[in-house]
Amino acid sequence: MENKNLIHPAILPIAPKPSQYGIDPSLVKTRVAELPGMCSLKLSELFPELPDVIFPGGEGALDKLYELAKDEIRKVDMSMIQPDQSVNVLASHHGFTLLGGQPYAVLLKAIRDVVIEKTGCKNIRLRAGVGMRFRETEEYIKRYGLDTYYGPGKAKGVAPVDEGIPIETEIGTLYGIKAIYDADWIIHAHHTDVREVHFHRQIDKAVKPFSMSYARIESRSTYHQNLGPRAANFTARAIFESKFVQSKFAFGAFLNVGPHGVIGVIADNNLYNINDRATFIGCQLYGKVMTLFGKIDECIAVLDFPCPVPYVFSAGVIYANFTGANSDLYDMEGTPLPGYTWYTEAFYGKNGKPLLPETPPLNPAIKMCVHNYAWTGYPSAFFSEHIPTVVVGAEQAKLFDTEPMNIKYMDHATIAKTTEGAMEFAYNATGTDKVIIFDGAMGGLNCSESLAKELIEKAPAVSKEVEEVLMPKWFRQRGVDMSVLEKLK
């Protein structure tokens, strides 16, 4: 590849957003992508085999997505929904951080409109679940006008500490959120973005929200406190396949998302058909970016996105996955510790040391983290404890100091007055000028020119390795028939 033809001016980062979980947007004075030496790579040029996207796509892209979503949702059987019944459209907070949030909001609007059109049912409510930021989806509902679109009192955020409802499953009683299931029918609105592949391991990814976004804390904590991510995967399937949930499930409608943007919409009465599509996309498309990131030998990682520390984006991949990029997070047989959940404290003692000698470190390629802009709302001290971290601005440092889940974050980090000062410190301390920026740049990734040249050089070999070596292994481990791949594209 010709380096000069693939290196572009930096893509506009996702803008700061007002939230109780982050500093006031006016305090974000400089974005790292604006600094000298930064540029952008377009994923469609790094990996030309990536499919075309609808969004980002210029003026009218969201309107096009809305019409396409309606066309796909119209194909689903809705005969079970009667005009005098009620329907809950179920959403998850992570969908609103994808590509600026608007595409997910468009999907939620399209679902409502088509259900009314096809069934005559007008009692349609939105229930948007969260993780540890209990008020987050309330902010999203207002930001994207979903409270007015769905109608007064029909759109609300729900949290895992809300009133629960027992759900009898084949493994015993688990607990959902009562407000999720207080309708005759439920519609599962989600996305194929891989997000926490270190948690679900691209197994039943489409089913995961039933034990996370839609479950009480006692059941969703199986991922974090009880069984660990690998073992906890079956709780989502147990809840979804329970007689109670199956008696209410109408269909699923997903944004079909790749690392470079929205490819389309998938809607089906059979959630496992959607799950198969999500498995293919997660391995085939995201797997290439993940594998490429694992080839980076050294860099400064920059957090510059309106989201908690582990969930900031670069090229469709979250920072939490990058901290584990020194191993193949898709490999179910890899060593050491197959299935290791990289960024959590699960494999570390209170002294900050690994519980087992074979526990690998966080990605050693990350020489320093510059925290220019990221939110609280997720326990993140583990990151600053294991990766040298510079936080920009006293206001941002104070926010983390006073947030219950992060009162130790700044114990392991230092403060820079300005973004420019933080980057200068990082360059001098690490001796590298390679920078990767987790700022949500849509359609590509923002980075330094030195790293861009390295990624361009390595991308063709990565694509070949994923297609010919890794994907067959990943699918074999999951019992997936690769011959079905062409039919699902």
Image: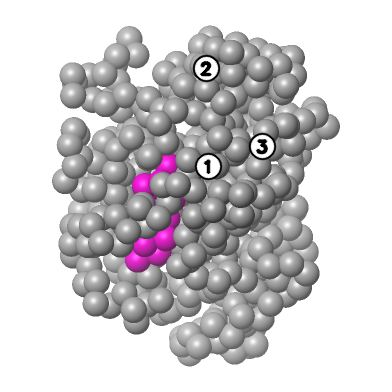
Residue at the spot of label 2: 431
* Residue appearing at x 26%, y 26% in the figure: 360
Three-letter amino acid code at the position of disc 1: Lys
The alpha-carbon separation of the residues under discs 3 and 2 comes to 17 Å
The alpha-carbon separation of the residues under discs 1 and 2 comes to 18 Å
- Labels 1, 3: front one: 1
In this rendering, does residue 369 appear at all?
Answer: yes
* Badge count: 3
Q: Position of residue 248 (x, y in %)?
A: 42, 72
- Local SS, label 1: helix
Q: Position of residue 47 (x, y in %)?
A: 47, 60
Q: Is residue 281 magenta?
A: yes
Residue at the spot of label 1: 453
Front-most of residues 336 and 380: 336
Mark linked to residue 38: 3
Three-letter amino acid code at the position of disc 2: Gly
- Local SS, label 2: loop
Front-most of residues 164 and 274: 274
Quick check: marks 1 and 3 in contact, CB under 8 Å? no
Q: Position of residue 92 (x, y in %)?
A: 53, 55
Point out the tag, 1 or 2, that comes first from the N-terminus. 2
Q: Which residues are magenta?
A: 280-293
